[in-house]
Amino acid sequence: MNTPLAERLRPKKLEDYLSQHHLVGENGSLQQALKAGIIPSLILWGPPGIGKTTLATIIAEESKRPFYTLSAINSGVKDIREVIDKAKQSGGLFTQKNPILFIDEIHRFSKSQQDSLLGAVERGWVTLVGATTENPSFEVIPALLSRCQVYILKPFEKKDLILLLNRAIKTDEILKKKNITLSETEALLRLSGGDARKLLNIFELIVTTENDKDVVVTNDMVLSKVQQNIVRYDKTGEQHYDIISAFIKSIRGSDPNAAVYWLARMIEGGEDVKFIARRLIIAAAEDIGNANPTALVIANNCFQAVTTIGYPEARIILSQCVTYLASSPKSNAAYMAIGKAQQLVKQTGDLSVPLPLRNAPTKLMKEIGYGDDYKYSHDYPGNFVQQEFLPKEISGTTLYEPTDNTREKAIRENLKAKWGSKYNY
């Protein structure tokens, strides 16, 4: 049998579906929708191998709806229109159960391809179910996104993956021919990266290549059998997150040689140029910040340029940006500051805005003190005067703490001169 274990083990019913309890558990939003028989158009967003395609198939099966599927990798507008025409005919005029159109990797559709779906979704000819590994806010056009519910699928927990392995051992007809013992699972779980499909494919490889009927799975055994097979970048997503992690960490670690190497791996693997450029913008703000504010300007310009130019020339622009960011001084002070601020907001709630800082557009507001005692900074020497800008309950809280790079040392000294008596600079 050539069918991979992951496909053989794909659940057919919701009760057999592992994980995503927040969606398909007893009180899950999708479970409730299925019970009510009202399935909205939706986007399933999550990393590879967590059951997006499986969930879409189960939704169609349990709702008793016709099911059509397209892959964004090899489908065009013509294919979309043909499927929509078929769906309209199969739906008929006297049924309330619209056919489901499942589009895998919907983020790979161009704007025109996504536009071609709008009419069918809006008129209810189809119920769209899209699957994506990318943030739909960036990759799905607003008009289509507004017509869909977005459901976030979470990575598998360790207990779910082990349960999946045990289910494979007990139920798969091929694996049942051997006596399999899971002595150690750490290597399996680590290599799979939470991807159930990858986990099962690795598991099948190590078990079926053992000549003995009795198979004891250990960490050393797993590593020895699959280590040589995991170095290739897979643009379909199996090492997508590992490679981008190495890429960003190389930039953060100020190693332009490693950073441009991982960039080359992604380019050769066919990674989306916008995905790479978007991550560079994030890195410029998160890992460089005010240590070199120009980094964010260059990263943003890089995104605009490569989006316009595309491959193959975009590789040159990406290389320039990557080597610049990796070579820049580093600071995560701005990143840490917003994290601290958000945590403080969660702890303290909606504190009142000090009266001097409030806008006073009406006479009543002026009469009750809105805007009173506010000091206009530009009326004072050096365009600065000390006054209270935080709610009194958290007055004096230091959130932004400049690091010791050259630029932020200067920022710290400037802030210390201004706020030394209030903040810890």
Image: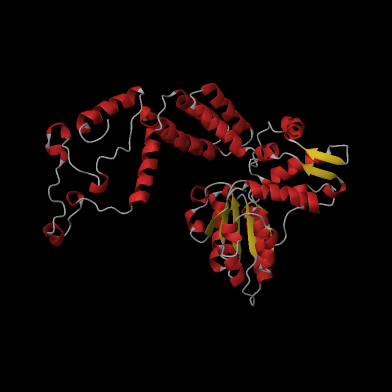
Q: Quadrant of the C terminus?
A: top left
Query: Does 240 sit left or right of 402 as displayed?
Result: right
Would residue 104 be seen by someone viewing this image from the given angle? yes
Residue 39's image quarter?
bottom right
Query: Does 29 sit left or right of 298 as displayed?
Result: right
Which residue is located at x 81 percent, y 44 percent? 180
Which residue is located at x 59 percent, y 72 percent? 36
Residue 247's image quarter?
top right
Say which of 377 and 317 sits in front.
377
Q: Is residue 193 above or below residue 10?
A: above
Q: Position of residue 355 (x, y in %)?
A: 18, 52
Q: Position of residue 205 (x, y in %)?
A: 79, 39
**How many labels were placed on the picture?**
0
Q: Position of residue 163 (x, y in %)?
A: 70, 50
Query: Does 148 sit left or right of 179 as displayed?
Result: left
Q: Is residue 223 above or below residue 367?
A: above
Say which of 48 and 158 sits in front.
158
Q: Position of residue 408 (x, y in %)?
A: 33, 27
Say which of 314 and 203 sits in front.
203
Q: Specify the farthest residue to the bottom.
A: 94
Would residue 84 be seen by someone viewing this image from the given angle? no
